[in-house]
Image (cartoon, coloured by chain):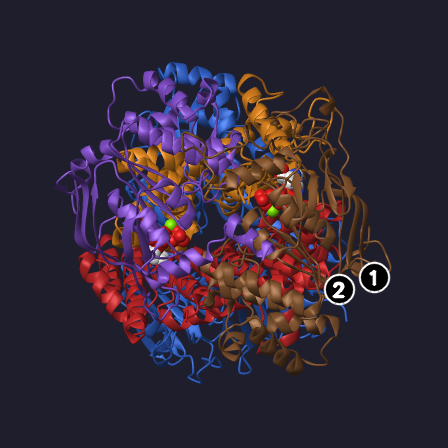
Chain colours: A red, B blue, C purple, D orange, E brown
Amino acid sequence: MAVQMLRRTLIFVVSVLVASAAVFGLLAVLPGDPAQVALGVNATPDLLAKTRQEFGIDRPLLTQYFEWIGGVLSGDFGRSYVTREPIGPQLLDRLGVTTWLVGAGMLVALVIALPAGVFAAVRHRRASGSVVSGISQLGVAVPGFLAAIVLVQVFAVQLRWLPSGGWTPPVVDPVAFLSGLVLPALSLGLVQGAVLTRYVRSAVIDVLREDYLRTARAKGLTPYRALMRHGLRNASVPVVTVLGLQLATLLIGAVVIERVFVIPGLGSMLLDGVANRDLLTVQGIVLVLVVAVLLVNFVVDVLYTVLNPRLRQAS
Amino acid sequence: STPSDPSAITIGFTAEPANFDFTRSDGTAIPQALLYNVYEGLVKLDEKGEVRPLLAESWTVSPDRLVYDFSLRSNAFFSNGRPFTAESVKFSVERVKSAAWSISQKSKMDVVSRVDVLSPTKARVVLSRPSNNWLFDMTTRIGAMFTPDGVADLANDPVGTGPYDVAARNRGSSITLKANPRYWGVKPAYETVYLRYFKDATALNNALLSNGIDVISAVTAPDSMPQFEADTRFTVTQGITNGEVVLSFNGRKAPLDDVRVRRALTQAIDRRALLDTAWAGRGELIGSMVPRTDPWYTDLTGVNAYHPEHARQLLADAGQRNLNLRLRIPNLPYAVSSAQVVKSELNKIGVGVTIEPLDFPAVWLKSVFTEHDFDMSIVQHVEPRDITTFGNAEYYWGYDSPRVRQLLAEADRGSAEQQVSAMREVAATLANDAAACWLFLFPNMIVAKKKVGGLPLNQISESFDLTLLRRVGS
Amino acid sequence: MNVIEVRDLRRVYRRPRTALTTPGTQVEALRGVSFDLPTRTRFGVVGESGSGKSTLIRLLAALDKPTSGTISFQGEDITGLPERRLKFLRRELQVVFQDPMGSLDPRMRVRDIICEPLVAQGHSDPAGRLTELLDAVGLPERSADRYPHQFSGGQRQRISIARALAPNPSVLVADEPVSALDVSVRAQILNLLADLVERFSLTLVFVSHDLSVVRHVCDTVAVMRSGEIVEMGAAEEIYEAPRHEYTRELIAAVPTLRTALRRFSE
Amino acid sequence: MTAMTVRRSASPSLWVGLGLVGMVVVTALVSFLWTPHDPTLVDAAQRLRGPSGDNLFGTDKFGRDLASQLMVGARTTLFVGVVAVGVAALVGTPLGVFAAMAPRWLGELVMRVNDLVLAFPALLLAIVFGAVFGADTFTAMIAIGIATVPSFARIARSGTLGVLNTEYVLAARSAGRSRTAIAVRHVLPNIGGLVIVQSSVSFAIAVLSEAALSFLGFGTRPPTPSWGRMLQESQELLAVEPRLALVPGAAIALAVLGFNLLGDGLRDRYDPRLEVRR
Amino acid sequence: MSADPALAVEGLELSVGGIGLVGGVSFAVAAGERVGLIGESGSGKSLTATAVMGLLPEEVRASGSVRVSGVDHDLVGASEKQFARIRGRRMAMVFQEPMTALNPSMRVGDQVAEVMLVHGTRPDKATARAAAVDLFGQVRLPEPREIARAYPHQLSGGQRQRVMLAIALANDPAVLICDEPTTALDVTVQARMLELIRTATEERGTALLFITHDLAVVAQTCERVLVMYGGRLVESGPVREVFTAPRHPYTRGLLDASDLEAVDERGRLRTIPGAVPGAGDFPGGCVFRNRCTDASGQCAEVPDLSEVDDRGFACWHPVGGRA
Ligand SMILES: Nc1ncnc2c1ncn2[C@@H]1O[C@H](COP(=O)(O)OP(=O)(O)OP(=O)(O)O)[C@@H](O)[C@H]1O
Ligand SMILES: Nc1ncnc2c1ncn2[C@@H]1O[C@H](COP(=O)(O)OP(=O)(O)OP(=O)(O)O)[C@@H](O)[C@H]1O
Ligand SMILES: [Mg+2]
Ligand SMILES: [Mg+2]
């Protein structure tokens, strides 16, 4: 048992190390000189050289990498070339924002997808079910940013019910925080909800075909109750997989939404970082994203065993 | 901000300062927020382009135009409580020349040979050669006044003498300025100013439309202007900036080293039509690198005016057939829009154009600006009086004219009248040589709630000057 | 002479991990099986589910490697031989599987299915042999261009048998070839197998959980339980006078019409 | 009990999907021969015209005909899908098959790396590629393709594992087929359905990605018409001229819908679980 | 035999999209009687059973009549609600696949308790659970208490099938339908299971409809047998009579083919020529006529199932001639 845990942890650490090397390598080939970006036009060569030295980017790549990864392993992500502040706390800040956004988006998605997906599955041979799955099909086909733009036009610009963007931390003003979260969460959640609806639908349809659901009906449960009592938990296994994958895409896909709604999350930090060639920051962000995704996968694995007793220790 | 709080105002911007230290980070965002608001210099530039007193109440210039004697305000204090004195001037100016400053603009201080403290309120600056540009440059960030114990953490804690002090910052989203209670001058109209940042022009517009902000500092989506103009909630102003949108030619390389080719390309482009399509007709046409607010402005739009037949002829004369040019532009809206029109126009005279948007600033700076790997580019040149760059043969456009260099030097050295006439000649020469093709002068479009007055018509200094704002009504 | 000699064959499977924290369990599918198979025997293997019958067959066909022990085929040790040195085995020994649908690639035409061993072994005229084979298993010639799903279970099993016969093997191994079939079809296939064994002088290894089927088809029977052969001998002998307790149990449990109907006459 | 085969007739979603995709393909093909106007010709006089007989969908702020841009944009859309899905399928499928057929440790390794790529932000890849090789449709789509490789590898691997567990693969092995022959003759045809389904879904995702990248300014180069860029350029005019956003927006949505429906329809046809009921 | 049968099926017709799958099936099962339903794969046995249970796939249309004792309405055309009250209470079913018929994520004890709670035959969870443990003992599961806490995957196939039986018997139904309940089991396990079904139904006086394709199993378990082919009942009667003196050529063929000891002169088993056609491909008239050696022109007409004294067959040329 301990050995297995160790093995998993080891795989995880190695994955993160490989990922870190990949990020580093990828960014090393990125054209553009961080020093020049920081200094701007008309920078003199010796100023450039001095700044490069200050950033530490004049040293061999391997040295840079080991220094960076060494720092990261001890919790130090380095200092941003641009803000000249430690990156770690900033990352945490931004991660918090993105987590709120993604969490709220996921919530919206689930609130839409669970009932809609179950409904569409139970009625998949009838018109009402087809209508729901048709709508979800359309929802999947709408680009997320288009949904965002339209939502802003309607609810912020025309009706002026909600802010068009911006971010208020929950501790500063909970009401402003929530009202600012509504539209981004909807933009993110509607499309993801449509995607999820389709998965829920097909998972439930699969479950509806299962023998044990027939058994449940043979016991005298109505089809609906049979599904509720016996189907959903089993249908949730494939849905959780998708949820895990979606969470990963959401973390990254939030970039566009963050852009439209001017939300200072990881996505906008990533875009800024790349534009400013703030390489240490970008490396940090990507590493955090990769770790987050791997962690989500890990959680999904654990959830599996909770949901599916077959995966627990067999007697 | 709560719209109900009359002493607060929220202003929307597009470019967010990465930090507060403009001595070491380039870009327009930091001085836009801090200069004249948090930091003050001895002098400032007003919206008509005139140099005005600020921390210096007055100054005299010696006849040989090498010695500047400034008399300073005695009631100015830095936000950390230190008084502003002649020592501050000496410290600040010398600091620009030291390694503490690392941005390239610091070279503008090279002309200063020393600073003398004559008394707490009298400072003398001695130049190594006469320079008209120096005093003008003192209105920019390099003229900002610091105090020795206020420079420990410039990136996060700016200490200046201005009407505002940075109260809070929310990275990626906003900066809060609070009025400095010990400010020496007129108390600003708004006690609290929220500077909010929107990377996206449309997001910025929407914020105002949905009452999220009170002012758009600069509309960069010109096509959206009609919706503000039609809305009775808003005041709209349109002035100019000193940002010349330039179609630059790489003069180092054939065939663009040939003046006929450059003239042909310039004449092939209908700049009125370009402005109309690419920037909704907002902005002004200019014929050279001079905005209307400079004293030596003359209308040069007639030089190398639109004349496609003539352009074709010029190309033929230059022996250019099947010309194909790489238009490598920053991936910014104005450049992308303008480039498409330029391509379409040049195609009409048989010149092929490949548009390559480059990651800005990083890749553009590297390939175009530093490595000169381009035929043409489109960039907005926002620095004040950047016509002088044509005197630098090393500059990316590779324009090399000894005559222009000489004229520029004379202008800097000479009297005010000499300066104006020399600069006029420079502008005319550039236009004539088609050293570049000046597409248009970037407009300054501000939209604000009706309750906000005092909006600066033109944006020609580095600062978004909050001291100008007024409250209207109520 | 013995075609096949099996000595102390063991095979241990490691089940894939089912929980995050625990390693997979080990399953001893075969625990020391030995027997000799003289040429032209019809050898039956019976045993309940999970007793290791299929495992044994996979090892005989060199589709899997034993954990220990040896199998020699026509005098040559085939355990641990790399695939490229197994050509003779692939020619001499062929397998018929249980699931008449699952053992035929649904995306291949019958023609290609039957010719697959010939093509794989570089036969000079696979197409020529096809007609012969179809005829041997009693399928019409036009079947060749159809897909497996267009056939009934019995017909599919015929296709499977035709494929096995293609390289002219001397040993035919059948893993529960009739377990998935209806009684009427079962009879047809059993008849066919008997015909073919006779006609081509085949050695037959026939696996089933149904002792009466094995008794009908085979002359020698091995009874397996939990990876071991508990009893082995002539079919009639075992059926009439089982020595091992488990064999007796097995025989008693197999329902046959005759025994069942006796219930009514009592 | 035997398996009974219930061949499903083509579902409506397959037909609607085919219809929509066919429309995109035909539009793209026609655009090579004819468009109502030059889609890149700037004309200040024609700026922001409403729909008319001459300009079916009107013109944009450059005075360019929207209908013509839409037609040529269909090419970009298809190109995007072909490149991204091509890269992903051609790399991912063999990789997945390999991971399933290789020795366990090697397969594990491949899948671990695969997971990593899956965790890697596709956007960053697109940006880096754009910066290194010049931002345009092709590089962006190579990046999206690479980012999509893992999903193909996963599907291909699980499909292959399924196929390898069948008796017909055992039969092929005992027939003397080599590993490669089994991979080519048995595995690939039988996971083909899964790959095709995955392709059409990835096609849809690629089209959306191109739109999103163009929206962020890392996609198709101007002035090459692309639906994503049209949408981006229309943004500031949304309140004034919603038509400019609606037209490309609807085109994207319909094309994506088409590919998704096609994928669903194909899944219904190819999913062996639906085809054979036991 | 009581006059009022526990289960009565009259003229049951099932079709999908106009293709007839089952036609004119009528039979009755008395309380305490055990009736086998045999026939080759695809003959319509499962469809008939699921029609009785009201568990037909949506696309299948049913007509005719199905009645269960103690229920005052016809089950054909009954609503889901009506069925829900009957299933698991008045009639119950054991399915073939022990691997998939139980909910993998629920303890088996709870799955048994559920059927009692649903119908309110036990007042609360605790009682129902205790009753489940009891039932496990009745179906001879070892250590019923431990088993009740297990998940299906922790049980063997035979054990799971016993759990299924416990579920079916929990509310003492009037009718028990078993659809090939032992096909997936080992012979030794099968023998014990069959014994169990027999005694359990005997003890409770339950009417049993037992579906299988294994004639021997029917002979062991049932008193009466129904033979199905091509969606029709072709023969019926007491097991002994039908199996010793079959009248329908199809029954005859089945019997011959299952007897591995009866061989011809060449040592070959006897077979029915040809194969079972797919649904909808059966010939009109007598469904067996394309495989029947005795078929004549008369066979183009559908022969009725002539029932005399519990013994019936549907054939124009019965084995042994017309009586
Ligand atoms: N690939 C495998 N991995 C792990 N365990 C296996 C594997 N194959 C077989 N086993 C296990 O080995 C044992 C013997 O299996 P085998 O398939 O040989 O039995 P069998 O006698 O053929 O059974 P059946 O009658 O069900 O086909 C079983 O317990 C089975 O679960
Ligand atoms: N939903 C359906 N749609 C179309 N045909 C069906 C459907 N369900 C069953 N059938 C067909 O009806 C016929 C009878 O099926 P049924 O399942 O009752 O056979 P069975 O006698 O139980 O066979 P087995 O022994 O294989 O279980 C078969 O030919 C089958 O293909
Ligand atoms: Mg087996
Ligand atoms: Mg059945």
The quarter holding residue E116 reads bottom right
x 49%, y 33%: residue? E270
In percent of width and height, residue D105 lies at 26, 54
Q: Amino acid at mark 2?
A: Arg
Asked if labels 2 and 1 share a chain, the reply is yes
Residue on which disc 1 sits: E71
Q: Secondary structure at mark 2?
A: loop
Asked if residue B204 can be seen in this view, the reply is no
The quarter holding residue B69 reads bottom left
Up the image or down, B334 lies above or below C7; here it is: above
The image quadrant where one finds ligand 2 is top right
Residue in the foreground of this view, choosing between B223 and B57: B223
In percent of width and height, residue E38 lies at 62, 45
In percent of width and height, residue C135 lies at 40, 20
Residue on which disc 2 sits: E90
In percent of width and height, residue B41 lies at 44, 68
> Residues at badges 2 and 1 in contact (C-beta under 8 Å)?
yes
Q: Is residue A280 left or right of residue B206?
A: left
x 26%, y 65%: residue? A68
